[in-house]
Amino acid sequence: MDISRPAEHRLDGQNQRVRIASLLQRYPDVDANDIAEITRFLKEGLIVEVGFLITDEKLSYKVEHFRADHADKLGLSSRDYVIVTIIVAALVLACIFLWDASVT
């Protein structure tokens, strides 16, 4: 078992958070690639790293401003809604089948 991997992963997350923090400090004077990088971090980054970024007093306003400006990119996609619908439908069907099996 390699216990050094989580530390490397954590370091990558910290480095990424520092990079995103520097981009957010320059926001809104960033290019489209930077916006895509910030968006990807806020959507897919480690929740702890995103939390550290959001609770930073110097950046919290910038993060909220970014989220307001790019809410369409940060929300759930159509694919996400389809996946949730399929999961809910499967759970409902499982409950119906289990109910019918226990009644008879």
Image (cartoon, grey):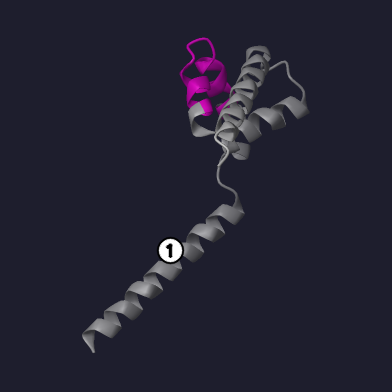
Quadrant, the N terminus: top right
Q: Is residue 66 magenta?
A: yes
> Residue 47: x, y in percent?
50, 33
> Residue 32: x, y in percent?
76, 28
Tell me the magenta residue range: 49-67
Residue that appears at 64% across and 24% down: 16
Give SS at disc 1.
helix
Give the residue number, with chain letter if any, for mark 1: 88
Residue that appears at 57% across and 17% down: 62
Q: Main secondary structure of the magenta part?
A: helix
Residue that appears at 63% across and 27% down: 12
Where is residue 68, by image quadrant? top right
**Relative to 44, residue 51 above or below:** above
**Relative to 27, residue 9 above or below:** below
Q: Is residue 59 magenta?
A: yes
Residue that appears at 60% across and 54% down: 78
> Residue 17: x, y in percent?
60, 22
Residue type at the position of mark 1? Val
